[in-house]
Image (tube, rainbow, N blue to C red):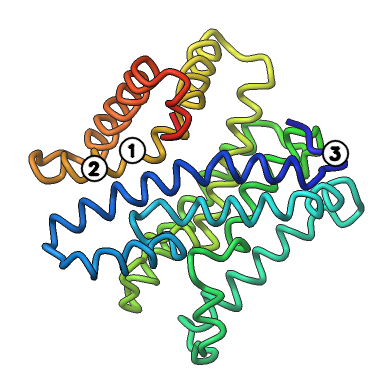
Amino acid sequence: VVFCHIKFSTEKKRILKVIVPYIIWTIFYMTIRFFYWGWEFEKFILQLIKAFFTASSAAMMYYILVYIQVTLLLSLIDRIAFSKFKFLPFLLVLVEIVLVRLAPILGWYDMGALTKYLSLPLSVVPWLGYFYLGYLLRNNQSPVKIKTDKFLFYLIVAIIIQFFEGWYYYSKNIVNCGTQLKLSSILTGLVFCCITYNFITKPFHYLKNIFCKILKFLGDYSFGIFFVHIFFIMIFTKILHLTPFLLGLLVVVFSAFSVFIGRKVLRTYASYLGF
């Protein structure tokens, strides 16, 4: 959808579309915790209420609250995308990552209560770059004009930088040294998005059709896969010992299949699960 002159009614519809699946899957994952940890019912209710507001029922749920924030900002994003300040959101991401996340690790200052709050995954700022890049590309407002072969070179450089930044985080005893909110990780992701966009929109060899069909299939099932994939990760990591690649492949296959079955069985009600 091209968002021009966005009205609140559009934003409201997009938010309502994700809220119902969010509530259902939050209850589902918190119920699993209830039985697994043997909580008392009173504690379960308190934890459930907390999970609704903090997206803590499962690792990926933070994205829904981030998505809601981005949706509420669509009117502003639309104006910036078609203005001379087109690069402002990317600059904002850079400043946030450096000041709120990287600076405390480098010892520039101790992170206070405010910055601890801002650095929560629920903050929309560090994730804004991905959404904004997609918005620009969809509206033919590409921020850069670079050939795919040069993007591939930049991707290799970004991966190398990411390796060393991850190693530095690890050397500083940062538990989540593989976080996506490193500068190098965001750079790698943005470059890869540009490569994928070029691959889809520019003339290429016969593999393009296969690649696009796979992307379309995963895209059509992606919202359901998003909600259910953690469940299959929980199961397969308990009963199987697989390499990350095989585990990921198995999770995607089973998740997509479950969405497919869910759509066939639930039909019009499947949307309540995000299927």
Of the numbered discs in the image, which one, if any, rests on residue 127?
A: none
Q: Secondary structure at mark 1?
A: helix
Front position in the image: 172 or 27: 27
Amino acid type assigned to the residue bearing label 1 in the image: Val
Front position in the image: 57 or 217: 57
Q: Earlier in the sequence, mark 3 or mark 1?
A: 3
Taking the image as shown, residue 71 lies to the left or right of residue 238, namely: right
Do residues under tags 3 and 1 come within 8 Å of each other at their CB atoms? no
Expressed as whole percent of the image width and height from the top left, the position of residue 20 reads 48, 43
Q: Secondary structure at mark 3?
A: loop
Q: Which residue is mark 2?
A: 233
Q: CA distance from mark 3 to mark 1?
A: 33 Å
Expressed as whole percent of the image width and height from the top left, the position of residue 236 reads 16, 39
Q: Relative to 66, is 9 above or below?
A: above
Q: Which residue is mark 3?
A: 4
Q: Residues within 10 Å of mark 1 (few under 14, many from 20)?
A: many
Amino acid type assigned to the residue bearing label 2 in the image: Ile
Q: CA distance from mark 2 to mark 1?
A: 9 Å
